[in-house]
Every structure is written in C-alpha cells, then in structure tokens.
Amino acid sequence: MEQALQVIQWYRWRWQIEQLFALLKRVGLDLESTRLESVKAIERLTILALMVTLRLLQLNVGRTDETLSASVACSDPQQQCLRHLMPRLQGRTQKQQNPFPPCSLPWATWLIARLGGWSGYRSQSPPGIRTLSQGLKKFEAIFEGWSLAQDSFVCT
C-alpha cells in the first residue's frame, strides 16, 4: 500500500514537471525558438523563463486553495496594485465579484485571470495556463507603470 502511494506521488510530480516543460516550450514561453547562441545567454534566458513558469504554475495550482497567501506568487507591492485594480476587474453583478478572501492566492489568481480575458463566472471553466499567462503579462506591464507612479520624483 505504501509503495502504491509513493508511485502515485511520483506521478503527480511527473505531471507538474510535464506542465513546467510545456510552458517553457511551445505552449507558453516558446523557449525553443530562441536565436541565442551563447551558452551563458541561453542559461540566463532559461532561468528567467523558469521564474515566470514557476509563477504561472503557482497561480494555476493554487487557484482554489484559500489557505495559500498571495505572497506565494506576488510581492506586497504587487498585492497592493491588485487591490487597486480589483474594482475595475470585478463585474457589476454578484456573479462577477471575486469570491475569494483578499490577499489569498486564489484572489490574486482570479484577478490576473480577469486581466487575461477570463469572464470570472463560476459557471465557466476555470482559467487555464494560457489565460493566466496573458493576464500575468498584462499585470506585469500595469504593475511597472503603477510602481513608477508611486515614486515621487520631480522632473526638471
């Protein structure tokens, strides 16, 4: 019995690894189409791609686990930015309100999925990796601008 449980656990890990590589390849970041030739440059690109891929997997896996904090995938400033975006991303009806506790990982995933084009309805299938990837790209751009706007600087 114990051996069977171990094999099942290994298979679960294998599925996560398969998703990781699918995201790195054509499904997500298309790492295979790089034209870089230097080993160092390819290593750096792979590390950056792994960081993004890991974040996408965290959002995907944790999209319903309300015990997980948004800090798993988002920094405190990013969570603050998401709080500011939330009124714009939620719909007018109760069915399009973010149902998750603020600052939980599913709360952040719901908002990022909305940025990726997901409708937010519970009757719709949950957001997939592609939707989360599009939402995360859009969120990163929004966050960059939001961060710049938070800095108080003087132009002369």
Image: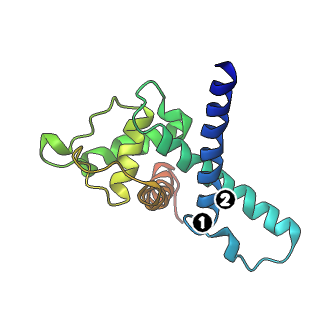
Horizontally, residue 55 falls left or right of residue 146, namely right
For this rendering, which residue is in front, 15 or 146?
15
Horizontally, residue 96 falls left or right of residue 8, namely left
Q: Residue furthest bottom?
A: 35
Who's the residue at 69% across and 72% down the image?
Answer: 32
Q: Secondary structure at mark 2?
A: helix
Q: Are marks 1 and 2 in contact (CB under 8 Å)?
A: yes
| Quarter where residue 97 is shown | top left
Instruction: Tell me residue 40's x, y (percent).
Output: 87, 65
Who's the residue at 53% across and 54% down the image?
Answer: 153
Q: Disc 1 to disc 2, how far (Cα)?
A: 7 Å
For this rendering, which residue is in front, 11 or 47?
11
Instruction: Tell me residue 145's x, y (percent).
Output: 47, 59
**Residue corresponding to mark 1:** 29
Quadrant (top left/top right/bottom left/bottom right) for the C terminus:
bottom right
- The amino acid at mark 2 is Ala
Q: Residue furthest front?
A: 1
* 20 is higher (above) or lower (below) than 27: above
Instruction: Tell me residue 131's x, y (percent).
Output: 41, 58
The disc, 1 or 2, on the residue closer to the chain's N-terminal end is: 1
Instruction: Tell me residue 134's x, y (percent).
Output: 44, 62
Who's the residue at 67% across and 32% down the image?
Answer: 7
Q: Residue furthest left?
A: 93
- The amino acid at mark 1 is Leu
Count of numbered badges drawn on the protein? 2
Quadrant (top left/top right/bottom left/bottom right) for the N terminus:
top right
**Residue corresponding to mark 2:** 49
